């Protein structure tokens, strides 16, 4: 019987999806102990936090190098907990740079390892799959094509559906949303979704904001910024001139649902926006060193998850040097000005949601965890 579970989620999205799993575990066994790395969502669900995701939420090669002492310290602490608390199973959620190494540590102590939300090995480091064969007892994947990919390499894998489908709740219809946030219902809504990490925002948001202002100077529009749970409106207001821009925190899904067009930082947010069939432009910028190193490793020709899941490019991608205010504005202008293009994109995006499976991923994951021993 599983009585003690260590879980490691190193990012905001992992915290969100991990919380669903913690809730399902607690629902089945009230006395089960869950501890490890997570955020406020996992804490509220009943997990004991050893480290908070905010302590480990950094990205890019330079940032990882700078934080190596912290990463090693966290690894040592969790390794000691494996020895002294002796969990029945370790559940790793995404966060591959840390979690794949920790999987080997857990297996050396003969502890079962469940990996939920696969590293994007289909995009880069496909050789990692072979290494997982001896270190991961089961891989619970959230995209249907991943199941076959792992099966070919002899890794036990199961498609459980995408956890987004169980958390995407909105609070307002369009009329009440516009009224709640003081928006003009006679003007289109342009949503800016700059990501959940300050490192992303610093590189991407100024170009997004500049593009939005260009459009606003040409035609009347509402400009809103969906503030991720890991950031605060104060961060944006302190750092940027936001005259004429509405910051919205705690209602990101409403922002995605009611936007006529969204400019979205590449990542899970592109899938979330796709689930509302909202036309979008995917953008991404990082440091040039991180970008050049990534180009050497990445094996796919599309970066947006929405396009990867679709199996073709259905939304434009503006990456690195192409992610300029001028080009972003041109794409937004095209979509706002062509009802046919927007409707065609909506139809394509509605198919993406169907590819993500059915709701209930957290329940399926919890069942695997309780059965793995």
Image (cartoon, helix red, strand yellow):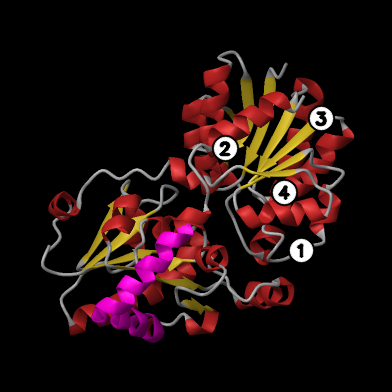
Q: Can residue 351 be seen from the camera position used here? A: yes
Q: Judge from the rendering whether residue 195 lies leftward or rightward of residue 26; answer left or right.
A: left
Q: Which residue matches tag 3?
A: 111
Identify the residue position indicated by label 4 in the image: 98
Q: Position of residue 315 (x, y in %)?
A: 44, 73
- Magenta range is 326-352
Of the numbered discs 3 and 4, the one sitting upstream in the chain is 4
Q: Is residue 178 above or below residue 299?
A: above
Location of residue 289 in the rendering, given as x and y in whole percent from the top left corner: 66, 76
- What is the tally of numbered marks visible in this picture? 4
Is 368 included in the stretch rendered in magenta?
A: no
Does residue 55 appear left or right of residue 113 in this picture? left
Question: Which is in the foreground here, disc 1 or disc 4?
Answer: 1
Local secondary structure at mark 1: loop
Q: For the point 57% across and 66% down, which residue is it?
A: 308
Q: Earlier in the sequence, mark 2 or mark 3?
A: 2
Graded by Cα atoms within 10 Å as few (under 14), some (14 to 19) or many (20 or more), the crowding at tag 1 reads few
Q: Nearer the viewer, mark 1 or mark 2?
A: 1
Residue holding disc 1: 125
Could you tell which of marks 2 and 4 lies nearer the N-terminus? 2
Q: Secondary structure at mark 2?
A: strand
Query: Going by the image, does 216 lie left or right of 322?
Result: left
Q: Residue at x 35, y 73 (%)?
A: 344
Q: Which residue is mark 2?
A: 38
Earlier sequence position, callout 1 versus callout 2: 2
Residue at (61, 29) in percent of width and height: 366
Counting from the top left corner in percent of width and height, residue 62 is at 67, 66
């Amino acid at each position: 019987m599983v009585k003690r579970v260590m879980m490691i989620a190193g990012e905001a999205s992992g915290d969100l999806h991990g919380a669903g799993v913690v809730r399902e575990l607690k629902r089945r066994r009230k006395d089960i102990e869950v501890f490890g790395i997570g955020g406020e969502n996992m804490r509220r669900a009943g997990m004991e936090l050893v480290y908070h995701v905010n302590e480990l939420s950094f990205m890019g090669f330079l940032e990882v190098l700078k934080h190596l002492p912290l990463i090693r310290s966290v690894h040592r602490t969790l390794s000691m907990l494996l020895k002294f608390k002796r969990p029945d199973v370790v559940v790793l959620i995404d966060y591959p740079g840390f979690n794949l190494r920790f999987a080997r540590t857990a297996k050396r102590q003969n502890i079962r390892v469940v990996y939920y939300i696969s590293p994007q090995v289909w995009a880069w480091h496909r050789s990692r799959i072979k290494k997982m064969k001896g270190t991961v007892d089961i891989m619970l994947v959230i995209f249907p094509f991943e199941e076959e990919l792992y099966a070919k390499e002899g890794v036990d894998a199961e498609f459980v559906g995408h956890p987004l489908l169980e958390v995407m709740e909105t609070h307002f219809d369009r009329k009440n949303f516009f009224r709640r946030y003081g928006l003009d219902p006679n003007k289109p809504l342009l949503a800016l979704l700059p990501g959940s990490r300050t490192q992303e925002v610093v590189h991407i948001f100024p170009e997004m904001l500049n593009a939005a202002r260009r459009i606003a100077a040409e035609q009347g529009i509402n400009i809103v910024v969906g503030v991720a749970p890991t950031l605060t409106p104060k961060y944006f207001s302190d750092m940027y001139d936001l005259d004429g821009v509405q910051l919205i925190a705690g209602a990101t899904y409403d922002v995605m649902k009611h936007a006529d067009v969204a400019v979205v930082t590449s990542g899970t947010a592109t899938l979330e926006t796709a689930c509302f069939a909202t036309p979008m432009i995917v953008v991404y910028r990082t440091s040039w060193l991180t970008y050049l190193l990534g180009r050497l490793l990445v094996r796919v020709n599309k970066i947006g998850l929405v396009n990867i899941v679709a199996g073709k490019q259905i939304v434009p991608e503006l990456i690195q040097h192409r992610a300029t205010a001028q080009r972003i504005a041109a794409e937004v202008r095209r979509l706002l000005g062509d009802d046919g293009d927007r409707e065609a994109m909506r139809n394509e995006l509605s198919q993406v949601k169907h590819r993500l499976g059915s709701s209930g991923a957290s329940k399926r994951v919890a069942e695997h965890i309780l059965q793995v021993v």
